[in-house]
């Protein structure tokens, strides 16, 4: 009985921590992405959370929007994929408060990404 109660408590605590972390990601993020060729792009990331599940969309420099795929938060690691002009891009970031830093690769290129949560 004691092990079952402890296990339930641990699962509940982990679920609440994930929900709190996921909800802190919800909102608008101003993103700067750089390519290996030295090009820089400014994008907007809109994150949402519903029933403990993260979702989002990326607003491209031309105003087009694409949905995020396979959005995952594992500890402080936020990962997702996005399809742009027929190519898949994988994004890996580290969450540190109101900033995201990381890398992306896809479409025959790779680069760095930084984001700050808009106030």
Image: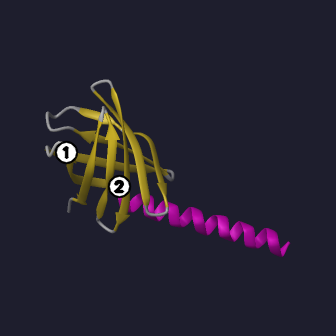
Residue at 32% over, 51% down: 103
Q: Nearer the viewer, mark 2 or mark 1?
A: 1
* Quadrant the C terminus occupies: bottom left
Image height of 118 relative to 68, above or below: below
Q: Which residue is mark 2?
A: 26
74 lies left or right of 89: right
Mark 1 element type: strand
Q: Residues within 10 Å of mark 2 (few under 14, many from 20)?
A: some
Indicate the position of residue 52 as horizontal and vertical percent values: 50, 53
* Quadrant the N terminus occupies: bottom right
Residue at 36% over, 55% down: 93
Q: What stretch of residues is rendered in magenta?
A: 1-25
| Overall secondary structure of the magenta section | helix
85 lies left or right of 14: left
Mark identifier at residue 43: 1
71 lies left or right of 57: right
Q: Residue furthest right?
A: 1
Q: Is residue 84 magenta?
A: no
The type of colouring in the image is: secondary structure
Residue at 51% over, 61% down: 18
75 lies left or right of 88: right
Mark 2 element type: loop
Marks 2 and 1 close (CB-CB < 8 Å): no
Q: Quadrant of residue 118?
A: bottom left
Q: Quadrant of residue 23?
A: bottom left
Indicate the position of residue 40 as horizontal and vertical percent values: 14, 46
């Amino acid at each position: 009985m004691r092990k079952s109660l402890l296990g339930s408590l641990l699962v509940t605590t982990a679920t609440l921590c994930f929900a709190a972390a996921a909800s802190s990601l919800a909102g608008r993020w101003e993103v700067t992405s750089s390519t290996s060729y030295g090009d820089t792009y400014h994008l907007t990331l809109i994150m949402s959370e519903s029933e403990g599940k993260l979702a989002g969309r990326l607003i491209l420099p031309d105003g087009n929007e694409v949905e995020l795929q396979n959005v995952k938060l594992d500890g402080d690691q936020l990962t997702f994929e996005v399809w742009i002009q027929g190519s898949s891009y994988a994004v890996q970031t580290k969450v540190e408060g109101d900033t995201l830093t990381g890398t992306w690769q896809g479409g025959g290129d790779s680069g760095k990404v930084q984001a700050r949560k808009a106030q």
